[in-house]
Image (cartoon, rainbow, N blue to C red):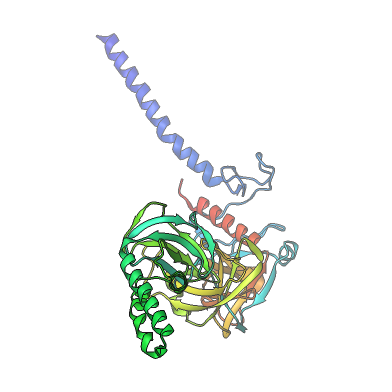
Amino acid sequence: MAIVRWSLVGLMAIAAGAAWIHVARPTSGAASRADARFHCPMHPSVLQDHGGDCPICGMRLVPVPAQGSGSGTKLEPRGREASVQGGPSSVPGVVPVFLEPERLQLIGVRTAQAARRRLAPELRTVGFVTADENRLASVTVRFSGYVKDVRVKGAVARVRKGQVLASVYSPELVTPQLAFVNSVRWSNAAGSAGTPPAASAPLSDDPRRRLLLLGVSEQDLAEMEQKLEPLQDLKIRSPIDGWAVSSTLREGSYVEPGAELFQIADLSRVWVIADFFERDMGRIRVGQPAKVKIAAHPDRIFSGRVEFLYPSLNPGTRTLQARIELANPNLLLRPGMYGDVLVELGPSDVLAIPAEALVDTGETQYVFVAARGGQLEPRRLAVGARGDGWVQVLSGLSEGETVVTTGNFLVDSESRLRAALDGFAAKPR
């Protein structure tokens, strides 16, 4: 029994020692981190209580900010190193920075003042070319019959006004043609008998009108007058110059009244349909000058005007569509092409800054405002129109304030690095 008792006491002592070691280790680690006063800006895991170089990258160690200071800590400059001038920032992930004048000159930082200027902005978007719907002609028949000959074959073909597209045999038109031919014969007979022409003119007037209403062309009527017999095949002709953009007609097929045989598009003028975001709806007006640049012709600029604004938004893209009409005499613009559309909004006096001063992340637009003593403060902006290398400032900046125009990428990188280091140092361990 004594052996068992002392064995249990020994096991309890071992367990107590292990528990004490487990509790003491985090305290010791925390104390060592608390004593660390220097760290590597590129490798925050490198911490030590004395200065020197980073064992990983060889970079000079910098002082660790005071615990809990966050982005509101101001680091004392060490030689040519930058320090953070803390303070609230309206841009997430970016903090104000302090750069010595020598370093500002070294990285090539240039500044400019926000000032009012006369700006001729352009609203840029994309658009696609389509046929002018007012210059489309649908070729149909007003009688039933059988297709005997298709002169224009294929999905697309160049046609001229009056060109024969196909011929159709129609039993329905045999009787109206006979009536017209007989009226012509009677008129000729009456004229040869010495009857005044005025008395014989009405004889062929009614049959002619009936055939014209059925879609028979003047050329076919003239041929019947010459031959004095009905035509076996009635010719379907193009009503305009253009391109036959669609045809499902086949020889031997049966057509009914109202069937569309061809669709002719006159492409001497085309439309460009441009999409504008909802936020730009109030800036688009009918009559504004517009320019279109097509990738197929990079050296050409096609000029036109906004002719029409569609009354509803496109449900697929949630954009407002505007129609621009352009002349197209050489068929440089073909339906289906995409291009850049620039709409001139008209000059106005606005508060503007150089375009290169704006840092645009897609979701946030901001600039770095230069204050006294080398402090650069990130400032979130609401921007408007752009043009001639300038950007309109709607809010966030006052006239006369100085912004960084050159080297702001390096300043932005420094600011984001300092914000990350502050966040790492402020994180409890």
Residue at the extreme left: 1
Depth order, front residue of 408/167: 167
| Image height of 344 relative to 36, above or below | below
Query: For residue 208, which quarter of the picture?
Result: bottom left
Q: Is residue 405 left or right of 143 when viewed as pictured? A: right
Residue 424 vs 272, above or below: the answer is above
Comparing 259 with 410, the one in front is 259
Q: Position of residue 250 (x, y in %)?
A: 41, 52
Q: Position of residue 309 (x, y in %)?
A: 43, 76
Q: Nearer the viewer, residue 309 or 7?
A: 309
**Apparent side of residue 164 relative to residue 413 in the rendered image (left or right):** left
Residue 304, quarter of picture: bottom right
Task: Write the residue at 39% across / 26% down.
Answer: 17
Q: How many marks?
A: 0
**Residue 391 in view:** no
Q: Residue furthest front?
A: 193
Q: Along the horizontal axis of the image, is 288 left or right of 38?
A: left
Whole-percent x, y for residue 67 in the image: 50, 54
Question: Between 122 and 63, which is closer to the camera in this rendering?
Answer: 122
- Residue 53 in sight: yes
Examine the image and state in which quarter residue 221 appears: bottom left
Query: Which residue sits at x=38%, y=51%?
Result: 252
Q: Quadrant of the N terminus?
A: top left
The location of residue 385, given as percent across then percent down, is 54, 76
